[in-house]
């Protein structure tokens, strides 16, 4: 055919296929063959040149039910292809009725569902052709004009999404998307069931963006967003509203989860939903607000969130206001949403940070904790670049929060950030250093606030700041040098207070055997409860050990249960591993390996006790510094010369000095290296530290004392040098050598002969040597003791103290030990010489002949505030340092049994040092008292000293005293607590009667009452309140042992105490019952009354006016003027240019439940000779057996009290009992 249509177009092409597709006797194979031929011809025909009239025959036959419902899959597959071809060729007009088209498209979808499951499926090519035809020709849009539109569309969507679970080709997914998009675009009104099918793809596979069905739904929604927006909005609005009314909040939550998914995958779909969410943010229903807040947080956190916030400014502002929502869960949801904004949208950071800064101080603990937790989840880059230092420091400040959960989150959050930033900080990256370097110091400052704060900080330090190396497959991979260098670097970031805290955490100072070692020993003796002998004693010791340990854990009750459970396990392997970890000789690699095995075995035996035993292991072992650290510490000092002694070397010196003082056992494997180090005379610091270490090691184990002649000669040379510290440690080591008597005798003679001609530097060094020899080689010292002590007293201690006219204007009160001028250093050391001589002879019969003049000198110094008489015009700084040294020397002497009783005559004077005008004196004295009371070296009466700090102008002094009392009283066994903290209440009352500020005016009584209230706050309990009241009453049944002048004061204090105890008990709803037992009052400070008549008259008397007692009620309190500056002052700026950190009322730290306090260890400790063992607690001697319950009190007038006093005075003259020498009123 060559005819053409008008316009030059080719003539229509007719279908050549004329065979019948329907008829009787037609086999399946024959039909299939015909359909293949027909499909091939139709597929090749062009729509533009087809003669549609020639298609009418096959058009009718193909929709015959015998074909559409044929059993053979091939027949139906080819029939579907042929039908799709016909629709293509007839387009845009369909050659079928609406009913026929409905059947055809239903037939199409059935065929695709049955056969399009993978390339390996039969007739896959035919099904692919069908899908491609529907996609490209868009004949599927005919569905939108059919009566069964909704049903067919739902079938199409369900079919396609169901097929997506198979691994189909990418083209198949694209064809399906095109078909579904076309259906949505062409339908007049989207059926709700279709929308439901689409949205189900997001709810059934939340977050699974890689799933084909999820991906297909995302493609379709993004392509038809304009059409779907309204439908989605209406659907969500109706569903949320109806379910909210029915209080089906589970369904409401599912709908909001759907919105989250849509915001991540199809944000444009939510254009009309945002106003609805904004309205939800302000609804009264908390659950709806919560869900809306969560959804909007995720929407704003999206990569397009900044643009979204600009477009919907009111919604952004409304979401930000959720920070002030009245419901706590909503505020938390807001905070959780801020994380994504900080991470992904730095341009919105400022507004979010402002909100977080307010929420870190939210009244609700969970909200504050959520802010802290948010920071712990940030990555390094976000924390570095998108979080302000102010917010980080605010979070760190929550380490002092009143709630433990917040303290835990805050501490861990900033500690984690330091851990992930450590490598950059160490590399001195400026941004990282500025942002994070302060974290260890902040945590350590927080540490002493409370018991669980210390436990939390300790855990954070161990896990993030100074972690133990992890156990790798090869223990050889553990880098001991890097581990030690991290310690030194972190220490370099700390101030002195933080360094002291870190030193205390190291476990170096723990007395051996430690509480942990004693616990393990108790476990071994307990033997899992199978005890052969002394069962009651073994069980009691285990219980006491558990109680003492558990008190320092975050949850004492749980810790006690776990410690008992561990004891019941009774596994010898666990005991052995723990002892290995606790052994000071264990190196780092062994510690890591043993720790790992211990935790694994505990987890296998009893997983519930793992947290407690992990904490126990951490505290019991040396995980901050141990014997593996020593070589690196020494090398860091070796690398520094005197001219460039850098901060790392200085910190290495600090750690070595601390080890020398408290745990020289760590040096056992390194004596040779230390001996070699003292030969490096050019490195002054290295020699000094090594001498101190060798001396401490030799004192710990004499077998480790260096014995070679060259070392001996070198020591003698160092002893005679002018470097006072090197001379001091060399002398200490010299006293431990085998030939020490001869060597020390020679040294003493040489020094004695040259004292008068030595310059000041050399004099200070020589005095330091004499102090060591007087203590450790007393026989050698006594050869020249008369000459030496006379010279030191006249020419050093009492000479050159006068203040010059030029110094009168400056009035320097304190100089740090390292900055002392040589002559003042010599004075302090001279006092030590006198003290050490007494200590060395403490067991000799003539000790009191030696000690009494010394004690009298010390008492004189205290009496005259650092001078030797009241008229002296001595330099202030000299007086300050002398009275501190006199006080701590008397404390040291009080710890020795032969001298303790002699100190009692000066006890009031000594204890009043805690109220010295100088902050440094008060602080150092309190540290010494706490240190020696903690180790039971001092008589229990010294435990009244911490209670005398209540009026201190510096809150840190009060906090430290409070922390010691609370921790010690809580962890002590009951009998020890009774002796050391409850029975001393009587001694406290007696002391207050002798206090120079005592009086019965309203103001004076209020001050005295504060001491009693402070004691009650820390010690009183429902169990001991009857005893305390009984002791207060008993004060009116005796008289003062020193002078009758103080007896009346004691009776007044007794009345105040009784009154305050009643008030305290009433405040706590406690009953003050009669004490059933008997008590023995201390016979060294009180005596019995001379007669029963005198006792009855005193008991009936009234020694405090009623108006004054009313003042103690607190209604009203007198206006107490501040103590004059001349009495006591808070810390003043240090003279070396370093000021003590300023404190504000809001920032004062409350350390009411801290573990035992740390004695300062950073500054040079010249008083480090206190190496005597603990002195056992003394029973109160010469006590008075109580007689009978006191008679009911009756108040007497002042005149009656005066007559009673006169009667007592007359009867006391007749008493044959001896009294101690009367002390002055200052005593």
Image: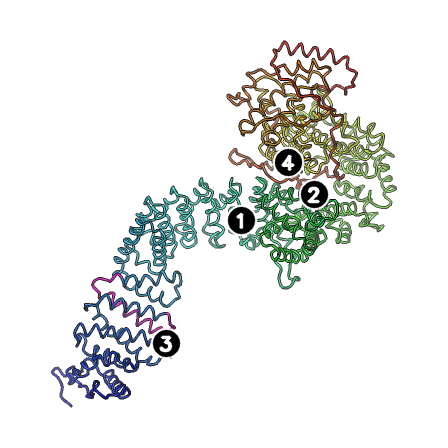
Q: Which residues are magenta?
A: 165-192
Q: Which mark is nearer the camera, 3 or 1? A: 3
Q: Which mark is residue 118?
A: 3
Residue in the foreground of this view, choosing between 247 and 448: 247
Name the residue carrying label 4: 969
Q: Quarter of the image for the C terminus: give it.
A: top right
Name the spot of residue 775 as percent of width and height, x first.
80, 37
Residue occupying the point 81% across, 30% down: 791
Above/below status of 1141 relative to 1084: below
Q: Secondary structure at mark 4?
A: helix
Name the residue carrying label 1: 412
Q: Which mark is nearer the camera, 2 or 1? A: 2
* Upstream in sequence: badge 2 or badge 1: 1
Q: How is the image coloured?
A: rainbow
Q: Secondary structure at mark 2?
A: helix
* Upstream in sequence: badge 4 or badge 3: 3
- Taking the magenta stretch, the answer to whether it contains residue 172 is yes
What is the spatial separation of the Cα atoms under label 4 and label 1, in whole angstroms?
A: 30 Å
């Amino acid at each position: 055919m060559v005819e053409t249509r008008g316009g030059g177009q080719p003539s229509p092409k007719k279908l050549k296929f004329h065979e019948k597709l329907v008829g009787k006797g037609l086999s399946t194979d024959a039909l299939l063959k015909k359909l293949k031929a027909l499909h091939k011809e139709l597929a090749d025909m062009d729509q533009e040149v087809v003669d549609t009239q020639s298609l009418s025959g096959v058009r009718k036959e193909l929709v015959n039910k015998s074909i559409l419902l044929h059993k053979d899959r091939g027949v139906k597959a080819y029939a579907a292809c042929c039908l799709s071809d016909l629709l293509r060729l007839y387009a845009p007009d369909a050659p079928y009725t609406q009913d026929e088209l409905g059947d055809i498209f239903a037939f199409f979808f059935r065929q695709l569902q049955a056969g399009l499951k993978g390339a390996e499926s039969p007739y896959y090519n035919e099904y692919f052709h069908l899908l491609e035809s529907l996609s490209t020709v868009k004949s599927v849009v005919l569905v939108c004009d059919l009566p069964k539109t909704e049903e067919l569309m739902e079938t199409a969507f369900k079919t396609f999404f169901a097929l997506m679970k198979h691994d189909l080709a990418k083209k198949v997914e694209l064809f399906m998307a095109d078909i579904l998009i076309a259906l949505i675009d062409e339908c007049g009104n989207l059926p709700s069931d279709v929308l439901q099918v689409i949205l189900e793809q997001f709810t059934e596979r939340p977050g699974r963006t890689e799933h084909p069905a999820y991906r297909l739904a995302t493609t379709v929604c993004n392509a038809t967003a304009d059409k779907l927006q309204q439908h989605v909005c209406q659907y969500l609005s109706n569903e949320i509203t109806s379910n909210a009314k029915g209080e089906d909040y589970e369904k409401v939550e599912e709908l909001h989860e759907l919105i989250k998914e849509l915001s991540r995958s199809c944000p444009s779909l939510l254009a009309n939903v945002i106003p609805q969410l904004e309205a939800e943010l302000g609804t009264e229903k908390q659950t709806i607000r919560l869900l809306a807040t969560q959804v909007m947080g995720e929407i704003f956190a999206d990569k397009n969130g900044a643009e979204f916030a600009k477009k919907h400014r009111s919604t952004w502002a409304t979401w930000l206001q959720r920070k002030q929502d009245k419901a706590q869960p909503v505020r938390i949801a807001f905070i959780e949403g801020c994380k994504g904004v900080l991470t992904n949208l730095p341009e919105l950071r400022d507004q979010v940070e402002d909100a977080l800064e307010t929420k870190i101080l939210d009244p609700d603990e969970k909200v504050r904790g959520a802010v802290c937790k948010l920071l712990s989840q940030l990555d390094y880059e976000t924390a570095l670049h998108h979080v302000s230092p102010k917010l980080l420091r605010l979070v760190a400040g929550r380490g002092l929060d009143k709630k433990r959960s917040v303290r835990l989150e805050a501490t861990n959050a900033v500690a984690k950030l330091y851990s992930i930033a450590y490598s950059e900080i160490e590399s001195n990256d400026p941004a990282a250093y500025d942002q994070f370097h302060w974290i260890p110091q902040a945590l350590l400052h927080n540490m002493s606030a409370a018991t669980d704060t210390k436990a939390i900080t300790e855990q954070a330090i161990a896990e993030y700041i100074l972690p133990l190396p992890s156990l790798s497959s090869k223990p050889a991979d553990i880098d001991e040098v890097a581990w030690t260098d991290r310690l030194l670097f972190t220490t370099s970031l700390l101030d002195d207070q933080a360094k002291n805290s870190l030193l205390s955490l190291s476990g170096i100072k723990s007395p051996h055997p430690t509480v942990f070692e004693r616990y393990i020993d108790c476990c071994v003796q307990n033997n899992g409860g199978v005890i052969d002998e002394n069962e009651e004693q073994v069980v009691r010791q285990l219980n006491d050990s558990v109680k003492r340990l558990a008190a320092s854990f975050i949850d004492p009750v749980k810790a006690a249960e776990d410690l008992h459970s561990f004891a019941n396990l009774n596994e010898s392997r666990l005991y052995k591993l723990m002892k290995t970890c606790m052994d000071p000789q264990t190196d780092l690699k062994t510690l890591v390996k043993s720790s790992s095995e211990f935790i694994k075995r505990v987890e296998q035996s009893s997983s519930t006790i793992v947290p407690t035993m992990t904490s126990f292991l951490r505290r019991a072992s040396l995980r901050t510094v141990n014997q593996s650290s020593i070589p690196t510490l020494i090398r860091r000092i070796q690398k520094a010369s005197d001219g460039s002694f850098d901060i790392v070397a200085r910190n290495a010196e600090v750690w070595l000095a601390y080890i020398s003082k408290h745990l020289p056992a760590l040096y056992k494997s390194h004596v040779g290296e230390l001996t070699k180090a003292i030969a490096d005379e050019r490195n002054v610091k290295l020699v000094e530290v090594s001498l101190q270490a060798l001396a401490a090691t030799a004192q710990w184990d004499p077998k480790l004392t260096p014995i070679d002649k060259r070392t001996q000669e070198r020591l003698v040379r160092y002893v005679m040098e002018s470097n006072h510290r090197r001379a001091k440690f060399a002398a200490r080591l010299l006293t431990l050598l085998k030939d020490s008597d001869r060597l020390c005798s020679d040294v003493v003679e040489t020094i004695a002969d040259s004292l008068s001609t030595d310059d000041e530097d050399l004099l200070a060094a020589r005095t330091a040597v004499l102090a060591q020899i007087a203590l450790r080689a007393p026989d050698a010292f006594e050869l020249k003791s008369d000459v030496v002590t006379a010279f030191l007293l006249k020419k050093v201690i009492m000479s050159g103290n006068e203040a010059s006219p030029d110094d009168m204007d400056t009035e320097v009160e304190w100089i740090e030990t390292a900055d002392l001028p040589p002559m003042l250093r010599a004075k302090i050391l001279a006092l030590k010489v006198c003290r050490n001589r007494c200590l060395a002879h403490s067991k000799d019969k003539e000790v009191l002949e030696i000690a009494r003049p010394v004690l009298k000198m010390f008492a004189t110094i205290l009496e005259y505030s650092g001078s030797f008489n009241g008229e002296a015009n001595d330099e202030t700084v000299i007086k300050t340092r002398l009275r501190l040294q006199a006080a701590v020397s008397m404390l040291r002497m009080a710890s020795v049994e032969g001298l303790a009783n002699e100190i009692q005559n000066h006890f009031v004077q000594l204890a009043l040092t805690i109220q010295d005008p100088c902050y440094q004196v008060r602080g150092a004295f309190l540290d010494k008292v706490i240190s020696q009371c903690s180790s039971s070296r001092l008589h229990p009466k010294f435990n009244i000293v911490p209670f005398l700090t209540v009026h201190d102008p510096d809150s840190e002094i009060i906090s430290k005293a409070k922390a010691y009392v609370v921790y010690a009283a809580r962890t002590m066994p009951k009998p020890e607590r009774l002796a050391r903290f409850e029975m001393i209440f009587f001694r406290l009352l007696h002391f207050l009667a002798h206090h120079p500020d005592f009086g019965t005016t309203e103001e004076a009584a209020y001050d005295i009452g504060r001491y009693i209230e402070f004691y009650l706050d820390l010690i009183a309990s429902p169990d001991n309140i009857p005893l305390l009241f009984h002791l207060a009453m008993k004060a009116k049944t005796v008289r003062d042992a020193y002078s009758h002048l103080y007896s009346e004061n004691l009776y007044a204090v007794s009345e105040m105490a009784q009154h305050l105890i009643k008030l305290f008990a009433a405040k706590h709803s406690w009953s003050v019952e009669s004490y059933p037992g008997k008590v023995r009052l201390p016979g060294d400070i009180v005596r019995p009354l001379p007669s029963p008549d005198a006792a009855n008259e005193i008991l009936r008397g009234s020694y405090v006016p009623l108006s004054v007692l009313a003042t103690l009620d607190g209604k009203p309190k007198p206006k107490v003027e501040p103590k004059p500056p001349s009495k006591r002052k808070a810390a003043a700026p240090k003279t070396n240019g370093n000021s003590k950190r300023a404190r504000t009322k809001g920032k004062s730290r409350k350390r009411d439940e801290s573990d035992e306090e740390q004695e300062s260890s950073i500054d040079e400790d010249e008083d480090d000779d206190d190496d005597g063992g603990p002195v056992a607690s003394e029973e109160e001697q010469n006590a008075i057996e109580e007689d009978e319950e006191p008679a009911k009190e009756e108040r007497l007038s002042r005149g009656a009290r005066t007559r009673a006093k006169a009667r007592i005075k007359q009867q006391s003259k007749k008493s044959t009992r001896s009294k101690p020498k009367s002390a002055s009123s200052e005593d």
